[in-house]
Image (cartoon, rainbow, N blue to C red):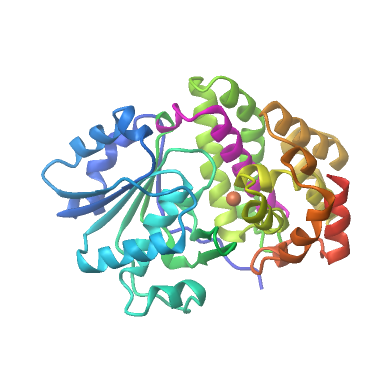
Amino acid sequence: MQKGYFMPTEVLFGRGTIDLLPSLLPIQKAQSIALFVGGSSLKKNGELDRILNMLKGKNVRVIDHVPPEPPPSFLLEQVELMKKDPVDCVLAVGGGSVMDLAKSVALLAMQKEDPITLLTSPPATFAKAIPTVCVPTTSGTGSEVTPFAVFWDHTKKKKYSIGHAALYATHALVDPDFTLTMPPYVTATTGMDAFTQACEAYWNKNANPQSDIYALKAISIILSALPTAVKDGLNIKARNDMALGSVTGGLAFSNTRTTACHSISYPMSLHFGVTHGQAVGITLPEVIALNASVQSERSAAFCEALDVQSIEEASDVIRILMQKSGLKTRLSELGIKKEAIEIIVKEGFAPGRMENTPYTFTEDALRSLLLRIL
Ligand SMILES: [Fe+2]
């Protein structure tokens, strides 16, 4: 049975929306706030001070050392801290890693059960999370509007995901001005992640009419904005469009989850250190062609979003988008050799991802796809 579209997060979008932060209900009501931030750029560009100024009079605990792709050990440490010293509201200002971590801490700290058990085998229901406000500083992950979070154990080469309706943020405050200082490569990889997520939301067994509208809109916005945002980071229109494309794509895949491109990307990232957006984008031109071969009736709307006449042309346009953004389109360019393909085949079937793909992948089909893009 088709599931209905569901979205509990209140989304505020536009330049200057950061000024609305103090008026958001969870912030207004909070006496104590945990503020999660990533690297030093927020401090350097003065945005952290600006936010702290807005929160004057409240007890604010700043966690400013969230690592990129946080390991489960960091999550557990933060959950313990939160249990010992709880707050009324969690605020995340950062990229996907920061938002994923903050949302998960806000949820797991409110549960009685051991967080590792919750992470490895999530229960059907959770106790309510601490209200969470997300302010993204990249245009890519969509975490501000999705019920997903990912953690990476690079030592054990293992990835942990949580996907549960209890993980939605209460508010997403998307201010494109916060993305202006993103370096070109981060813009490219996060932007390609957003583009791929939108394409995967469309070519998805869980797609519904609402997610289709969001996905197709996100695809056309990102296609035209990404190369400019990469080349000219201070181009306000491109940054505005990327932020809109990213959050719109998030609204699409929040309800469908991702598919084969994400599934195949995980061993590429864990074993070969390929950045997430690069890893998901590299198989996209091939994956959409396979999906279109089994759902040809869905090709026309997809091609229209990309302003092309055929799926072959759509695959070419995606390869050109990646090249124009400075990303690679062949595995060998990422240092992945023919011998390495078997480990990607072996570990590329992620539960909760691969089976959402309309095309039914076998190991042989995945192997020949990887050989085609070697
Ligand atoms: Fe992604």
Where's the N terminus, which quadrant? bottom right
User: x, y (%) of residue 321?
Assistant: 72, 31
Residue at 41% in and 54% down = 9
State the residue in front, 364 or 168.
364
Residue at 82% in and 47% down = 286
Residue 269 in view here? yes
User: x, y (%) of residue 80?
Assistant: 29, 67
User: x, y (%) of residue 218?
Assistant: 61, 40
**Prevailing secondary structure class for the magenta stretch in the rendered image:** helix
Q: Is residue 198 left or right of residue 21?
A: right
Query: Given the current orientation, which residue lies at the most extreme left position?
Result: 57
Q: Is residue 98 left or right of residue 81?
A: right
Where's the C terminus, which quadrant? top right
User: x, y (%) of residue 257?
Assistant: 61, 60
Q: Quadrant of residue 50?
A: top left
Residue at 74% in and 44% down = 282
Location of residue 107 with respect to 367 vertically, above or below: below
Q: Is residue 78 left or right of residue 57?
A: right
Residue at 81% in and 33% down = 308
The region drawn magenta spans: 178-203
State the residue in front, 101 or 347.
347
Q: Is residue 32 left or right of residue 328?
A: left
Decide whether residue 301 is among the magenta residues: no
